[in-house]
């Protein structure tokens, strides 16, 4: 039986973990996959339930950057050599390839930072600046030109082909699986108060929470009546990191902190409740590989205000409830005012997935 190895020691939270679980679900259920032996390298116990006759989950100590680089370069080769395993294919779900492993490789590339134009880091975002440079260099050193690459959107396919000089026929677009949402508890429009929801973790400033804070400040100055009805929920705490502390200080300085609810991490059910309660889902991010919350909001028929960027058009091109806006707080404030005073339709035809599963 041929062996295929899968390296994903970086997956521990949010999107990366979701991708790993989707991949393993396909391996577990796909009949063709059962004709291979799969060895999956992880650094935690979050996917142990996928252990089976043809899937082996192997935990390695590679959470920290230094250990991860050693594992990706030498450790994985030594592990295979010690056990006399010669894989027929090496799969990486971590956006980087295998530097020393001389076998065909497939790389799932879902890190957009090196491929976008964003370079407006805050002065204190030294780690993010370093990561952008380091991950780009590691990609160039490990993703060979004969690699098969999987990305999530068409804009990433173009960017990866141009920057890594990989032929487009070797790059495949697989959209993340959007789990169907079944709920009959869609909240009716409430014209006394308006709920806004931004489901994004601000690890890097391209998530652009600052735009929404400044939007509220403009709204407070120009339309106090509407401002007093607004509730903006965000999925972070005020002290999560230096960036959220900066946003909190800014909201206090502009005297709009009273309209912001800092929710922090939300479970799947809590996220669904926030989506349902929201009048508009906001997404001002300047850079995304895909933007999963956009698809989730559209699957519920929610109005979506999003920055006018290529990733947004890729995800929502077939959705009628999307409003593409420029990176200007004044425009977001004005469009918000127009929506709540003129717009009659508060729920749109849900964007239903076509059911295709690229993992097959």
Image (cartoon, grey):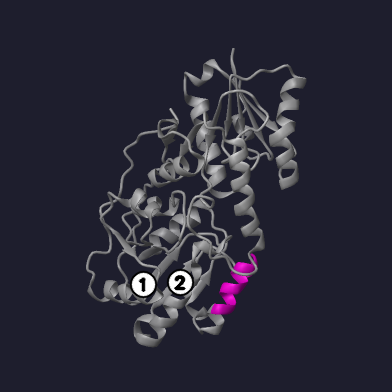
Classify 338 as above or below 284.
below
Q: Residue at x 52, y 27 (%)?
A: 27
Q: Residue at x 70, y 34 (%)?
A: 73
Who comes first in sequence, dot 2 or dot 1? 2
Q: Which residue is mark 1?
A: 332
Q: Per the image, is 249 magenta?
A: yes
In the rendered view of the protein, which quadrant contains the C terminus?
A: top left
The chief SS type of the magenta part is: helix
Query: Residue 211's mark?
Result: 2
Query: In the image shown, does 339 or 130 lie closer to the viewer?
Result: 130
Where residue 37 appears, as percent x and y from the top left, is 60, 19
**Magenta part of the chain:** 239-250
Does residue 228 appear in the picture of this structure? no
Classify 26 as above or below 270.
above
| Spatial separation of the CA atoms under disc 2 and disc 1 | 9 Å
Kindly indicate whether the residue at mark 1 contacts the one at mark 2 (C-beta within 8 angstroms): yes
Where residue 145 appears, as percent x and y from the top left, is 52, 32
Query: In the image shown, does 67 or 120 lie closer to the viewer?
Result: 120
In the rendered view of the protein, which quadrant contains the N terminus?
A: top right
Q: Is residue 185 left or right of residue 110?
A: left
Query: Residue 316's mark?
Result: none
Determine the image quadrant of residue 3. top right
Q: Residue at x 27, y 64 (%)?
A: 346
Badge 2 crowding class, 10 Å Cα cut-off, few under 14, some 14 to 19, many 20 or more, is some
Where residue 274 appears, as percent x and y from the top left, is 44, 61
Q: Per the image, is 178 magenta?
A: no
Q: Residue at x 64, y 24 (%)?
A: 102
Q: Secondary structure at mark 1?
A: helix
Does residue 142 appear in the picture of this structure? yes
């Amino acid at each position: 039986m041929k062996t295929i190895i899968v390296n994903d020691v970086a997956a521990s939270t949010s999107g990366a973990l979701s991708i790993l679980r989707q991949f393993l679900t396909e391996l577990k259920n796909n009949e063709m996959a059962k004709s291979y032996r799969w060895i999956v390298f992880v650094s935690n116990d979050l996917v142990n339930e996928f252990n089976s006759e043809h899937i082996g989950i192997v935990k390695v100590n590679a959470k920290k950057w230094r250990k991860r680089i050693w594992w990706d370069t030498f450790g994985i080769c030594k592990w295979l050599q010690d056990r006399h395993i010669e894989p027929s294919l090496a799969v990486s779900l971590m956006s980087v390839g295998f530097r020393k492993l001389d076998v065909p490789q497939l790389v799932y590339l879902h890190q957009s930072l090196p491929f976008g134009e964003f370079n407006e880091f805050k002065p204190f975002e030294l780690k993010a600046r370093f990561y952008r440079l380091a991950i780009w260099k590691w990609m160039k050193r490990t993703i060979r030109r004969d690699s098969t690459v999987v990305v999530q959107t068409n804009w990433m396919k173009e960017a990866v082909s141009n920057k890594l000089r990989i032929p487009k026929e070797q790059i495949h677009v697989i959209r993340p699986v959007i789990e169907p949402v079944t709920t009959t508890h869609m909240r009716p429009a409430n014209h006394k108060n308006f709920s806004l929801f931004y489901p994004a973790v601000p690890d890097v400033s391209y998530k652009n929470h600052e735009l929404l804070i400044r939007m509220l400040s403009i709204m407070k100055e120009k339309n106090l009546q509407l401002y007093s009805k607004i509730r903006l929920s965000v999925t972070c705490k005020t002290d999560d990191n230096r960036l959220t502390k900066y946003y909190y200080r800014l909201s206090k300085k502009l005297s709009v902190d009273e309209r912001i609810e800092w929710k922090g991490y939300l479970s799947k059910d809590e996220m669904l409740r926030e989506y349902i309660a929201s009048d508009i889902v906001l997404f001002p991010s300047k850079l995304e590989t895909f933007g999963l919350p956009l698809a989730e909001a559209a699957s519920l028929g929610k109005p979506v205000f999003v920055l006018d960027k290529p990733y947004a058009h890729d995800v929502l091109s077939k959705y009628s409830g999307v409003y593409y806006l420029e990176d200007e707080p004044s425009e977001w404030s004005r469009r918000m005012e127009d929506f709540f005073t003129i717009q009659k339709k508060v729920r749109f035809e849900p964007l239903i997935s076509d059911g295709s599963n690229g993992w097959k």
